[in-house]
Image (cartoon, coloured by chain):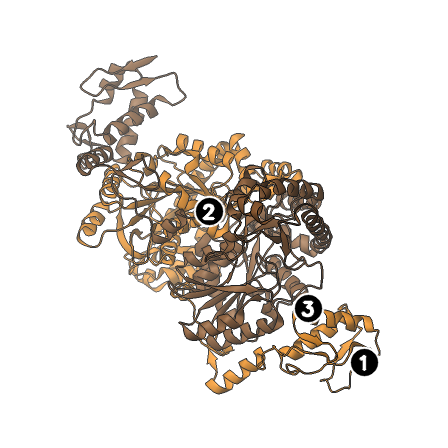
Chain colours: A brown, B orange
């Protein structure tokens, strides 16, 4: 039944055919009438008795609504004078302000969303505006063959893992559910320190390890703690876009340094740095250059460390997938060679375990620990303690080492299958480069090929092939595809290459070159 | 057995009494000798045959070590000339650089860590240095009585939850383990939008909801997207330190605005803003002011919205614990009154569920969605998809609404117990203020009491009582304690107050005042 009041008030329409209680309908109606300017500051409202009578309802919901409106300051009462709309309410209601301003000023549309009309310009920060301009990467929208950084989820020991999950969530300790410390869960940090010391040659104490949600957060924290606006950061060209973005949010100036077969050209960087304003930091992936896949030579490692020690610059070492090396023994981290505590070492469990685990770490020189801890606290507090505790068990019980060994074999075979499929099907269009390591390889296209167009086309066919040119800050000098082989089995790899062949064949530059 | 080589090389010591394989010991030895400058660029090394003979070991590990040293660029070979330390290796090794520089320059000790010696100054960013100076808050080190924001973990429906965990982790979908989108898991965003619309009067579409790891991340993302260095942000005084820190990492200028019994003094803010450089944003907790606990009046809400619409400023509304209101009906969010899409609305599951869940959200005006998504992508990618999926089920199956109802009753009783205990035991020293809502209250101390000293003393006794003065940016005008009652049961509350009484009684200002 719909009831309408017919007094001097704008008509109150309310109904009992809804779950919303009557007091709430009345409250909402008065509140909206005031917000819209249909009821004015100081305007008298009927007594609860009169309104109840008029609407032919009990007085109880009317009392409830009035009480709430009084408590929130929409109404006021004076002894003898009854109840009014509070006289302090602005005469211009928010929507009146909106309408008036639109009429007076002409309507302001945003660049981001033409058609939506706002009163005033919608100013973001420079950083925000730059972020809004980041191009969509359609090749990351699907989880099909060749998705970079995707591990073999179907080979993850989910049985062991879910048993651990069940164990830990059945009767969680208070500390597991409450607020954790910004540096992370101590037993987990101890396990990481031990692992890194043994397997990666990293020299650190557990107190230097900050648990993050992944390598991206480690990059952003490093940027925040180390870089002021306009500070120069040397990055690899081509290189990892995630790192670039992190440094840009600190308003740093990016100095791209070319990569050759020995990794970042450190000699060139040092020469250039000597001429200009000194760089404050350098970002490198020495174990397995991202995306090209080479390993930084011993000479360049030592040159880099010497330069950092002499110039007082920081080295950010991203060791994102060094667990997997097929051709040779694993290569120790740069961090372990550092005699001057200049290296910030970043690693992640996203690729060895699974991305949605959201666990990574950064090994921080001792004198930076306080700043990093405070930066993490300010960024988002701490990482899920449950996952940290589970991961500690997973490492301590030997599952982690076993899983890495199994995956190393699997990825080696997948890499071979991919190289073989490329040789067989696309040998005339793609040239595989990079060390036998990690979970992706780069296949170069004939010069001048529009790899972005190929990647977009592939994405529409359910294939995720990242264009090499997207890894360049300056105009790209080569064209190619970054192909992940972690997440696709050998059949999917062969099928993927068959599809990719058709896509690449139809690209104009390839047609001419082949 | 320990074997030592006695050639022209520095002595090679290695042993078979360790798990480290022999090739690795040899590799490590040569590598370290080169890094330390004990072996020089161009220096000849014995042939694998000669070294094996000298050490009386098989040639296989020697071959393995040499191969690896060649691959990494420590060694080089020339036909006919045998194997040498690579001539490109810098003559100054990293540790030689360190030693020389220390001798030449005098030794540089850091301010942060006197005694540790580095070659060059350890320059952090201004932001990093400021973060390193953030004072430790010893009252947050324990989970004892009165810990602010800690929910009643022992009343959490852990049975239901762990069943959900088990369900979701037994056979997780690929999408649950792989990379997720920066805005979050769509079914979860839909559930949040519905919840906020019904319960909080928030008007939004799921596409406007960005899932975060908690309200702190929402604050930092807002700061990044909206604020340039030196931009002015009005904040509540006293107010939430986490918000202050987030704005400071964007190098914003904080303008504290006093809070009175109707919340932030918006009239004063608008007047002041008219005189100086206009504020770019304002941060408010209108439902339940943090920490004082009052509710912003209808008049001030409308004034604030009108001002934002006219000046083009953003309003950051932090609705951190609005689920819990005991005395009156819940108060609708400011966001729902906004006719000009100026409000960024922040909420969290840390308090309604449990902190280590690491899930919160921010409702973003449509034209800011792209920038926020890119900012999240750059900050740390995405939130744990498993938890998002579980939380979706928890909401959809009605557990969430039920849990909130139960907790509301529980917290109401705990609040009453706390107020009663204070009245009975500390009525002469503490004055409780704020609305009957949330999970904490403020108890004012006699003017001039050193509340930080009391909090530190309490922390040593296992009691977490936050000093009110720590919430002030400028010199504090009142002294008091912020007491959480969510995480302590009635017995613990009474015991806590008994202890607190002794602590407060011994504070000099209180002794004089009482």
The crowding category of the residue bearing disc 3, from other C-alpha atoms within 10 Å (few below 14, some 14 to 19, many at least 20), is some
Q: Secondary structure at mark 3?
A: helix
* In the rendered image, the vertical position of residue A96 relative to residue A386, given as above or below: above
Q: Which residue is mark 3?
A: B71
Q: Secondary structure at mark 2?
A: loop
Q: Quadrant of residue B62?
A: bottom right
Q: Label 1 neighbourhood size at 10 Å, few (<14), some (14-19), many (20+)?
A: some
| Residue to which mark 2 is pinned | B214
Work out whether residue B23 or residue B135 is closer to the camera in this orientation and state it.
B23
**Crowdedness near tag 2: few (<14), some (14–19) or many (≥20) residues, C-alpha within 10 Å:** many
The earlier-in-sequence mark between 2 and 1 is 1
Front disc: 2 or 1: 1
Residue at image location 71% in from the left, 85% down from the top? B10
Q: Are marks 2 and 1 on the same chain?
A: yes
Q: Is residue A410 left or right of residue A473?
A: right
Q: Position of residue A427 (x, y in %)?
A: 66, 50
| Secondary structure state at the residue bearing disc 1 | helix
Is residue B430 at least partly visible in the picture? no
Dot 3: chain letter: B
Q: Nearer the viewer, residue B124 or B402?
A: B124
Question: For the residues carrying marks 3 and 2, which lies nearer the camera in this image?
Answer: 3
Subunit that carries the residue with mark 2: B
Q: Give residue B478's position: percent from left, percent from top.
A: 29, 56
Residue B386 position within the rendered picture, expressed as x and y whole percent measured from the top left: 57, 41
């Amino acid at each position: 039944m719909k009831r309408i009041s017919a007094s001097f008030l704008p008509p109150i329409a309310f109904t009992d055919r809804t779950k919303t209680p009557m007091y709430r309908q009345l409250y909402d109606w008065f509140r909206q009438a005031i917000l819209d300017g249909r009821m004015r500051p100081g305007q008298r409202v009927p007594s609860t008795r009169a309104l109840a009578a008029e609407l032919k309802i009990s007085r109880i919901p009317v009392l409830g609504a009035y009480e709430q409106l009084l408590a929130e300051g929409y109404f006021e009462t004076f002894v003898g004078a009854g109840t009014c709309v509070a006289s302090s309410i602005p005469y211009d209601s928010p929507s009146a302000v909106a309408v008036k301003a639109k009429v007076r000023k002409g309507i302001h549309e945003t660049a981001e969303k033409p058609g939506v009309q706002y009163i005033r310009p919608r100013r973001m920060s420079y950083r925000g505006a730059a972020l809004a301009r980041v191009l969509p990467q359609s090749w990351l929208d699907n989880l099909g063959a060749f998705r970079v950084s995707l591990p073999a989820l179907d080979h993850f020991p989910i049985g062991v893992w879910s048993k651990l999950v069940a164990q830990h969530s059945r009767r969680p300790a208070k500390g597991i559910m409450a607020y954790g410390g910004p540096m992370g869960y101590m037993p987990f940090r101890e396990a990481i320190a031990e692992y890194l010391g043994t397997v990666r040659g990293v020299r650190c104490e557990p107190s230097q390890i900050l648990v993050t949600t992944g390598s991206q957060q480690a990059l952003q924290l490093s940027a925040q703690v180390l870089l002021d606006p306009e500070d120069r950061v040397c990055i690899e060209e081509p290189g990892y876009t995630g790192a670039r973005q992190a440094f840009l949010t600190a308003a740093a100036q990016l100095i791209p340094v070319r990569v050759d077969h020995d990794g970042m050209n450190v000699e060139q960087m040092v020469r250039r740095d000597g001429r200009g304003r000194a760089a404050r930091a350098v970002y490198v992936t020495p174990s397995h250059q991202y995306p090209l896949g080479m390993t930084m030579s011993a000479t360049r490692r030592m040159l880099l460390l010497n330069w950092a020690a002499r110039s007082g610059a920081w080295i950010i070492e991203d060791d994102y997938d060094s667990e997997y090396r097929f051709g040779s023994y694993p290569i120790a981290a740069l961090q372990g060679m550092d005699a001057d505590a200049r290296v910030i070492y970043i690693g992640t469990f996203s690729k060895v375990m699974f991305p949605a685990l959201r666990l990574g770490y950064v090994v921080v020189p001792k004198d930076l620990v306080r700043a990093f801890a405070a930066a993490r606290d300010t960024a988002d507090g701490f990482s899920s303690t449950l996952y940290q505790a589970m991961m500690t068990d997973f490492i301590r019980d030997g599952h982690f080492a076993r899983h890495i060994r199994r995956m190393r074999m699997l990825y080696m075979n997948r890499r071979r299958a991919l190289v073989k499929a490329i040789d067989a099907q696309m040998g005339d269009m793609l040239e595989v480069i990079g060390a036998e390591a990690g979970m992706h390889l780069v296949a170069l296209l004939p010069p001048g090929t529009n790899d972005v167009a190929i990647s977009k086309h592939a994405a529409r066919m359910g294939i995720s092939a990242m264009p090499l040119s997207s890894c360049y800050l300056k105009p790209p000098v080569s064209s190619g595809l970054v192909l992940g082989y972690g997440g696709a089995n050998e059949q999917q790899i062969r099928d993927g290459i068959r599809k990719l062949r058709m896509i690449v064949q139809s690209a104009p530059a390839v047609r001419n070159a082949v």
